[in-house]
Structure formats: structure tokens, C-alpha cells
Image: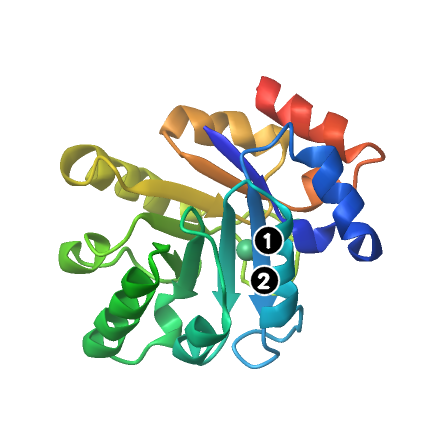
Amino acid sequence: MQIFPSIICSDILNLQKTLQTLDSVCDGYHIDVMDDHFVPNLTIGPDFVNAITRKTALPSHVHLMVDNPKNWCDRLNLKKIDTLTFHIEAVSSYDELLDLVDKIRNKGWKKGLALNPNTPPPEYPVLQCFDQIIIMSVNPGFSGQKFIPEVVEKIKNLVNIKKRYFSDLQIAVDGGIDKQNMKMLIDLGVDVFCVGSAVFAAQDPRQALEELYNL
Ligand code: DX5
Ligand code: ZN
């Protein structure tokens, strides 16, 4: 099990300090990119994302919640160990999805696909294109929301498919993760947790993160 704290939920005027504090205790960073169109919120642009990924030797998972993920691909400058994730709802055809997958592959990055809470699991030919599937357990746009329990069935389903057919595929869950639901999700076989407020709303984010690892 890996934990990727959602860095945009941290004290953003002290990002460098946050990286220094957490680098030795986490697996990497989840970076939320929102364009105020695909979701009703705005976070950071490509230069800012590039600056964060350059500052840490750990892998970053860049989670694009944007309308035209293809445009973003050219502006990003990630490390080979980083993952670029786009939403299946942001592409309008299978061909567009494959083009984007090729683009990310050509950059040498890992490929991630995110699914909104109401989106069903993708077909196998789609799944096999990716290194990671992010199952959203809140409607994307804001941190601090409550975990949507209906998503658990989809998580079980995708973990089963992964175990049978795609053993290298990472199953990640993003949204409303806390001490209460994380143990159950670990038992289900979730590989990666993207965690915002359960770490950064705590008085001591490093300690909060360590407590989640101890689960
Ligand atoms: C939601 C984002 C999440 C969010 C997680 O749109 O994709 O990554 O920052 O924050 P919490 O853990 O507070 O739900
Ligand atoms: Zn996210």
C-alpha cells in the first residue's frame, strides 16, 4: 500500500517546506490540476506543477481535472517515474483516448486514468493501456468531501479484474480517505491512496501521515 498526499491541500505558500517535511515519510505526491471548466475549481498551471515535480526525487501523480488533457501533456515536464492521469470523461472517443495514451507513452511517463464516482469500470482494452486507475470516491473539484460508499462495489470489481488479468495495474482511490475507511480499503486490495485533508487538516501532517501508514 502506498500513500500519496495531495500536495495542493497543504500550506501552499510553504510548499518547499512541506516537501522537505514529508519526503522521507511518503511514497510520492498527488498533484491536483483543475481548470475551472472540467471541474468548478481552479488550482495550479503547468509551470507550477513542473516546479513541484522537479523539487522532489519522489514520484508525482499529476491528476488532470481539465477539459483538454492533450494540451496539457505538451506543457508538462515530468520525471520518468511520474504518472500523468487524465479523466475518461474528458475524452470523447476511444481514438482520442488512444492518442493521448501514445502521447504520454512517448514522453516516457506512466499513464493514469481517472474515473468519476458514477462512471463504470472501463472495458479491458482500455484498462490494458494504463499503469494506474484512479477511482474517484468524491465528485472531483474539492478536497474535504465525504467518501461516497457506493464506490466500494466498483473498487472491488476493479481489484478483481486487476488480480485476474492485469497484475501490474495499480488501483488508486482518491477522495475522502481517512483513518476510518482506509483500513477497509487496504483489505479490499487498494494499492494507492491519494489523501488530502486527513493529512493536511491535521495539526501535524507528518504525524497524521505516519498514523495512516501504521494502519
Ligand atoms: C478532489 C481531488 C482530491 C482531493 C483529495 O477533486 O482530486 O485529490 O484533493 O482531498 P481529500 O482527501 O480531502 O478528499
Ligand atoms: Zn486528485
The percent coordinates of residue 5 (x first, y second) are 62, 42
> What residue sits 20% from the left and 41% below the top?
161
Q: Nearer the viewer, residue 212 or 46?
A: 46
Q: Is residue 7 above or below residue 161?
A: below
Labelled pair 2, 1 in contact (Cβ < 8 Å): yes
Query: Who's the residue at 24% across and 58% down the image?
Result: 122
The residue at the point 40 percent across, 66 percent down is 87
Q: Determine which residue is flagged by label 2.
A: 50
**Left or right: 47 in relation to 65:** right
Q: Position of residue 79 (x, y in %)?
A: 46, 53
Q: Quadrant of residue 157?
A: top left
Residue 113 image position (x, y, % from top left): 36, 58
Q: Nearer the viewer, residue 128 or 77?
A: 77
Residue under circle 1?
54
198 sits to left or right of 62? right
Residue 71 visible (yes or no): yes
The reply to whether the residue tagged 1 has its Cβ within 8 angstroms of ligand 2 is: no
| Location of the C terminus (image quadrant) | top right
Q: Could you give the CA–CA distance between mark 2 and mark 1, rounded to whole angstroms?
A: 6 Å
Relative to 87, residue 90 above or below: below
**From this viewpoint, is residue 144 visible?**
no
Which amino acid, mark 2? Asn
The quadrant in which the N terminus is found is: top left
Kind of residue sitting beneath label 1? Arg
Left-right relation of 204 to 133: right
Vertical arrangement, residue 161 with respect to residue 41, above or below = above
| Count of numbered tags | 2
- Which residue shows up at 66% across the image and 73% down it? 42
Question: Position of 74 compared to 183: left or right?
Answer: left
Q: Secondary structure at mark 2?
A: helix
- Label 2: how many Cα within 10 Å (few below 14, some 14–19, many 20+): some
